[in-house]
């Protein structure tokens, strides 16, 4: 075949040489099984679609992962289309070049042939993605057809990767050398894509040199990434619904309430004088018979806890440190609690309260007031003592004070906390807030952004094709 080609290309013009080489590549496609790239493209895209189909073009993170996955598929297909096509016939190229072959004609014929291969691969990839359940948007921004615009983007990514590999194949002396370099090129493209991995500032320059950066950006922009909700944080929060949260109120809080002289609930009763009583038991019997005391027992005591206080406890308490460090999805529980607390503070929801409003009689029963008083019933008092003096004497007693730190446990679940906010309200706030924080201007769905990325990919195609031509012009100097 090589001798026949050499005879045909001798003294032929550039256009005629392009036609001859295209015929050669078609024969190689048929007889050397180059057609196997098509079923491989279907298989790879089908496997990727199984992973990303659930939320691709539906949520921010799903669209970003899907755009990254499709970019990987395109780069993979393009790279392995041409990574060996030049280095495997390097000796033939040298002989044909000495016989009159124009390197520009040879590279141009490769470009035409590889462009057709890439176009078919992209069509098969989009077909496989659709069959695997990915729901593509219907309307495109530039042409009106989303699938047409997606085809253009994926074709340019695949063709740019193809031309990059063609350049590597032109530089490499052997197929082994080319295949050795290929994994490093793929890793560089994927790591510095700039979408999935958070890169330091110094690495942005490398990101701008990758095909994957512009490929991922254009697919994410076409999917309207910046207008989609972000669901990861809410999904992580919702998984905590059954997580128990414990808060507590101490008996000391109740005692402070009873001894607070400025509290309007207790002020009137505390100021009442005790007359003709000789001990605590007699005083208490007289107090129980008064209407003011009966009214006092029915007064409400608000022991509700604000949601903000609970979130602060969850965020700052040392006792809950292990809970905060527990990983959920891509976040720790502490990160989620801090996010919810920040949203609560900014929206005023932290003022929502939880807990219970008690009657004074219920609080007295809780601390066994009458039982304690029974042990002091014979304690002698002066005739001018007030009710407040009696309360202070009982509560400040050392035997009673030792119970100050005893806790009243408030048990509830994270789900009850979410319900207190309002589930739909919280979900909307979290998704909106996190989506706003995750927006990137490079993913804006604008004509300028999409077409700008297309032009960058076209630049890579032209650059690598020209570089391949320049390298092969010196093929005769290869003294192997």
Image: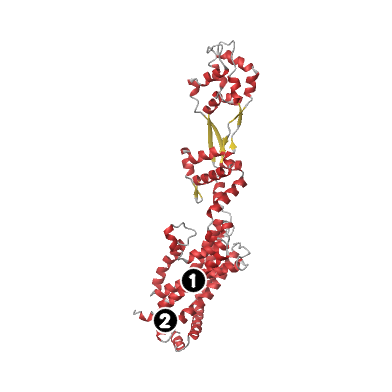
The residue at which mark 2 appears reads as 93
Q: Where's residue 156, x and y in %?
A: 52, 70
Relative to 468, does residue 74 appear above or below in the rendering?
above
Q: Where's residue 397, x and y in %?
A: 49, 20
In the figure, is residue 143 to the left or right of 113? right
Give the total of numbered labels.
2
Mark toward the start of the polypeptide (2 vs 1): 2
**Residue 264 in view (yes/no):** yes
Q: Where's residue 2, x and y in %?
A: 44, 84
**Residue 51 in view (yes/no):** no
Q: Looking at the image, is mark 2 or mark 1 nearer the viewer?
A: 1
Q: Name the residue nearer the viewer: 188 or 293.
A: 293
Label 1: few (<14), some or many (≥20) within 10 Å?
few
For label 2, the SS is helix
Residue at image x 51%, y 77%?
A: 113
For label 1, the SS is helix
The residue at which mark 1 appears reads as 459
Q: Quadrant of the C terminus?
A: bottom left
Relative to 385, does residue 214 appear above or below in the rendering?
below
Q: Could you say which disc has been placed on residue 336 in the image?
A: none
Residue at image x 55%, y 17%?
A: 374
Q: Name the residue nearer the viewer: 249 or 91.
A: 249
Residue 98 placement: quadrant: bottom left
Q: Where's residue 196, x and y in %?
A: 49, 58
């Amino acid at each position: 075949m090589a001798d026949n080609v050499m005879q045909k290309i001798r003294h032929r013009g550039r256009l005629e040489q392009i036609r001859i080489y295209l015929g050669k590549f078609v024969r190689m496609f048929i007889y050397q099984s180059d057609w196997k790239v098509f079923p491989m493209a279907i298989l790879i895209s089908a496997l990727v679609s199984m992973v990303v189909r659930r939320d691709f073009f539906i949520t921010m993170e799903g669209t970003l992962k899907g755009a990254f996955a499709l970019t990987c598929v395109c780069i993979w297909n393009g790279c392995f289309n041409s990574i060996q096509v030049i280095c495997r016939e390097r000796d033939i190229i040298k002989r044909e070049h000495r016989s009159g072959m124009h390197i520009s004609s040879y590279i141009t014929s490769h470009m035409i042939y590889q462009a057709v291969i890439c176009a078919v691969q992209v069509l098969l990839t989009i077909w496989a993605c659709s069959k695997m359940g990915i729901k593509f948007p219907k309307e495109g921004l530039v042409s009106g057809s989303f699938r047409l615009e997606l085809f253009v983007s994926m074709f340019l990514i695949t063709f740019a990767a193809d031309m990059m590999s063609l350049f590597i194949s032109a530089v490499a002396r052997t197929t082994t050398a080319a295949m050795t370099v290929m994994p490093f090129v793929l890793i560089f493209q994927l790591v510095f894509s700039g979408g999935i991995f958070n890169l330091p500032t110094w690495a942005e320059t490398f990101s701008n040199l990758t095909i994957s950066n512009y490929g991922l950006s254009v697919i994410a922009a076409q999917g309207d990434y910046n207008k989609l909700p972000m669901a990861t944080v809410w999904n992580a929060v919702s998984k905590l619904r059954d997580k128990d949260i414990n808060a507590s109120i101490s008996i000391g809080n109740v005692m402070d309430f009873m001894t607070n002289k400025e509290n309007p609930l207790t002020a009137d009763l505390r100021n009442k004088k005790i007359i003709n009583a000789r001990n605590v038991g007699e005083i208490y019997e007289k107090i129980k018979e008064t209407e003011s005391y009966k009214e006092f027992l029915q007064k409400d005591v608000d022991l509700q806890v604000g949601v903000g206080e609970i979130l602060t406890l969850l965020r700052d308490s040392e006792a809950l440190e292990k809970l905060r460090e527990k990983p959920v999805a891509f976040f720790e529980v502490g990160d989620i609690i801090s996010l919810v607390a920040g949203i609560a503070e900014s929206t005023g929801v932290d003022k929502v309260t939880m807990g219970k409003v008690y009657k004074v009689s219920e609080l007295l029963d809780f601390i066994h007031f009458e039982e304690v008083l029974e042990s002091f019933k014979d304690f002698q008092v002066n005739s001018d003592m007030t009710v407040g003096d009696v309360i202070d004497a009982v509560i400040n007693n050392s035997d009673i004070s030792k119970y100050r730190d005893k806790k009243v446990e408030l048990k509830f679940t994270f789900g009850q906390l979410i319900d207190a906010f309002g589930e739909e309200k919280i979900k909307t706030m979290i998704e909106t807030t996190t989506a706003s924080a995750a927006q990137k201007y490079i993913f804006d769905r604008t004509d300028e952004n999409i077409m700008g990325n297309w032009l960058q990919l076209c630049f890579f195609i032209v650059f690598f094709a020209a570089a391949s031509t320049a390298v092969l012009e010196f093929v005769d100097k290869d003294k192997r």
